Image (tube, grey):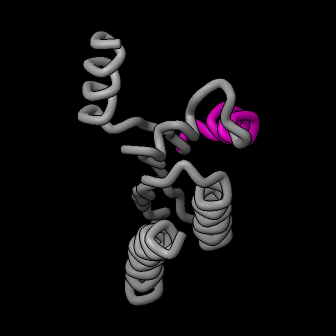
């Protein structure tokens, strides 16, 4: 339990750091036209609360940049156990589907290495 909490906190700290750096870039530069920002959020936990927090962070970052007159492309990458958040029985599947359909700058990806391992394991069963 403590290990999962530490992993989730580490992932969220990385996501928060990435977003904070992007915010700092916007505050220090004075672009004459809209700036396009990019953010990648990694999810490696099969905990719906962790994915929900990642989705909330993505929406908050998007809202921030829209208010600044900028755009942001956001990619949420699931790997390892986090890949289960993309399955048909995931408790967050409807929110992911809605976000991906409503916003072309919001992308959901799966780690290629994780997909390869899952395929290999499925072939052995």
| Identity of the residue furthest to the bottom in this view | 28
Residue 106 appears at what percent x and percent y? 55, 44
**Residue at 27% across, 28% down:** 117
Residue 115 appears at what percent x and percent y? 33, 28
Q: Quadrant of residue 59?
A: bottom right
Instruction: Look at the picture and state if 48 lies above or below 86.
Output: below
Q: Nearer the viewer, residue 104 or 17?
A: 17
Instruction: Look at the picture and state if 67 lies above or below 107.
Output: below
**Residue at 42% across, 61% down:** 37
Q: Nearer the viewer, residue 4 or 76?
A: 4
Quadrant where the N terminus is found in the figure:
bottom right
Q: Nearer the viewer, residue 16 or 25?
A: 16
Instruction: Look at the picture and state if 40 lies above or below 118.
Output: below
Horizontal arrangement in the rendering, residue 120 relative to residue 125 (left or right): left
Name the magenta segment's main secondary structure. helix
Residue 67 magenta-drawn? no
Horizontal arrangement in the rendering, residue 84 relative to residue 36 (left or right): right
**Residue at 33% across, 38% down:** 111
Would you say residue 110 is visible in this rendering?
Answer: yes
**Residue at 44% across, 77% down:** 13
Residue 90 appears at what percent x and percent y? 67, 35
Q: Quadrant of residue 99?
A: top right
Instruction: Look at the picture and state if 84 lies above or below 76.
Output: above
Quadrant where the C terminus is found in the figure:
top left
Q: Which residues make up the magenta segment? A: 93-105
Residue 42 appears at what percent x and percent y? 41, 56
Horizontal arrangement in the rendering, residue 80 relative to residue 51 (left or right): left
């Amino acid at each position: 339990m403590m290990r999962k909490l530490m992993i989730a906190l580490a992932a969220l700290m990385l996501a928060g750091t990435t977003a904070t750096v992007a915010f700092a870039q916007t505050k220090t530069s004075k672009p004459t036209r809209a700036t396009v920002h990019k953010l990648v959020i990694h999810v490696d936990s099969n905990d719906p609360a962790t994915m929900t927090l990642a989705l909330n962070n993505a929406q908050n970052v998007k809202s921030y940049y829209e208010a600044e007159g900028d755009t942001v492309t956001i990619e949420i990458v699931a790997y390892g156990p986090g890949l289960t958040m993309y399955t048909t029985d995931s408790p967050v599947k409807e929110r992911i589907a809605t976000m991906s359909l409503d916003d072309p700058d919001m992308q959901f990806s799966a780690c290629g290495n994780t997909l390869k391992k899952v395929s290999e394991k499925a072939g052995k069963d």
